[in-house]
Image (cartoon, rainbow, N blue to C red):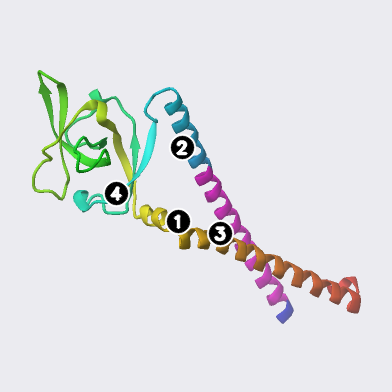
Amino acid sequence: MEEDKSIKLKKIWKTFYKIISYTIIIILMVIAAFFIFYVISGKLAEKEGKTPPFGLYTIISPSMTPNIKVYDVVFVKNVDTNTLKVNDVITFYSTNAFFGGTPITHRIVEILDVPETGTMFRVKGDANEEADEEKVFPSNVIGKVLFRIPQLGKVQFFLASKTGWLIAILIPAIVILVYDVYKLIKLITAKNKFEKYGPDSI
C-alpha cells in the first residue's frame, strides 16, 4: 500500500515536471521566434532604407509616470503619421542638442498645422506640468506606442552587465549539469537493483 502511494506520487511529480518543462520550452521558443523576427525585419528595413516595422525601447526617464515607468519597455509600431491623433503616445528622435538624438516617448497633446513646415506635433510627458518646447516633425516620429512591458528594462540592463552575462550563462549550465548528474545516479541505482534483484526490481 505504501509502495503504491510512492509510485503514484512519483507519477504525479513526473507529470508535473513534464508540464513545467514543456511550458518553459514553448515560452522560450515563442520569445526566440519573436526576437529573430524582430532582428530580421529590422535589418531588412535598414537595408531598404526604411524605418523598421516595430521596435522595443527602454524608458529611462520618469516623465511618463505613472502610465509608463522607468525601466518599462515600450513596444512601438511604425505608423503613417497622418493617422496619429491627440492622446496617442509616440516615440520620436529628439532634435534637442541636450538629448543628442535620443528616442523620447511622450504623449501628443496638440497637432499643429504650420504653414512654413507643415504638420507638427506638440507633445508632453504625463508627469510634466507643461508641454515640451520642442515640436516634433513627422519625419522624426519612430512610431506609436502600442503597449508596455513592465520593468523588462531591468533585465536588459542586468544582462548588459558582466555579472548579468555570467549568471545568464552559469545558471543554465548548472541546471543542465545537476540534471545530468541526477540521471546518472538514477541509472546507476537502476543498474545495481537489476544486478542484485533481477529485472522485476526495476
Q: Identify the secondary structure beneath mark 4.
A: loop
Q: For residue 10: magenta?
A: yes
Whether the residues at callouts 3 and 2 have beta carbons within 8 Å, the answer is no
Is disc 4 surrounded by few (<14), some (14 to 19) or many (20+) residues within 10 Å? many
Mark sitting earlier along the chain (3/4): 4
Q: Residue at x 16, y 31 (%)?
A: 121
- What's the residue type where badge 4 is placed? Ile
Identity, as a three-letter code, of the amino acid under mark 3: Ile
Label 3: few (<14), some (14–19) or many (≥20) C-alpha neighbours in 10 Å: few
Q: Residue 104, how many percent across, how many down?
A: 25, 41
196 and 80: which is toward the camera: 80
Residue 197 locus on image (x, y percent): 89, 78
Give the image location of residue 105, x and y in percent: 25, 42
Which residue position holds label 2?
Answer: 38
Which label was assigned to residue 159? 1
Q: What segment carries the magenta color?
A: 4-32
- Mark pair 4, 1: CA separation: 16 Å
Q: Quadrant of the C terminus?
A: bottom right
Q: Which mark is residue 112?
A: none
Q: Earlier in the sequence, mark 3 or mark 2?
A: 2
Q: Residue at x 60, y 57 (%)?
A: 21
Q: Which residue is mark 3?
A: 169
Mark found first going from the N terminus, 4 or 1 = 4
Queried whether the magenta region covers residue 11, the answer comes back as yes
